[in-house]
Amino acid sequence: METTNHIDGYARALLDVVGAEGDADRLSDELFRVAQAFGESEELKGALGDPLIPFERKQSIIGDLIGERASSVTVALVNMLIGVNRVKDFEAITRRMMGLAAEAEGHVVAEVRSAIELDDATRDRLAAKLAQVTGKAVTLNVVIDPSVVGGLVAQVEDTLFDGSVRSRLLELREAWA
């Protein structure tokens, strides 16, 4: 329960900063991408969460990784969470922040996994289709995931929509077994 409260508190604090900066979509997207990077690299999370590595070195690592690709606000927020030793919770905090932002706008967040980057037209069609199915406006977060092979996997709240080639191949395998 305590961890959930911390995650919620940090998510609300991030949301306040992101909202105050006036570029919430961009900052949210940048934080989501950093959260993805943390999720994909245990080595990175370990280094940034290691109490024996000085904070200045951790700041340098973040600067090298995202300094040129992200806004100074995003870099500062990432450094703040690292400074308060929340690296292990970074993904959960970011997801909660995005959920709170979507909720405030009457949306839901759909995490979409695809083997390839989706163009704007595809994103728009997908968001419209998910909105039709869920009855709610949808904000997409697209994760490039080669294990999907082809097609898409979308998670909206507690509902999973699996249209991936991988799942279809597994279904065929089971049907032939």
Image (tube, helix red, strand yellow):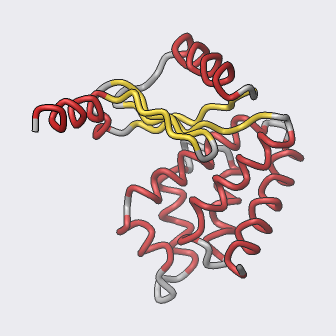
Q: x%, y% of residue 171?
A: 24, 33
* Residue in the picture at 57% in, 59% down: 91
- Asked where in the image residue 85 lies, by quadrant, the reply is bottom right
Classify 55 as above or below 135. Answer: below
Residue sitting farthest toward the right = 20
In which quadrant is the N terminus drawn?
bottom right
Classify 69 as above or below 137. Answer: below
Q: x%, y% of residue 147?
A: 28, 40
Residue in the foreground of this view, choosing between 76 and 3:
3
Classify 89 as above or below 162. Answer: below
* Residue in the picture at 64% in, 23% down: 133
Q: x%, y% of residue 126?
A: 56, 19
* Residue in the picture at 35% in, 68% down: 43
Q: Is residue 91 left or right of residue 43?
A: right
Residue sitting farthest toward the bottom = 52
* Residue in the picture at 46% in, 38% down: 143
In which quadrant is the C terminus drawn?
top left
Q: Is residue 138 left or right of residue 155?
A: right
Residue in the foreground of this view, choosing between 170 and 31:
170
Q: x%, y% of residue 65?
A: 47, 53
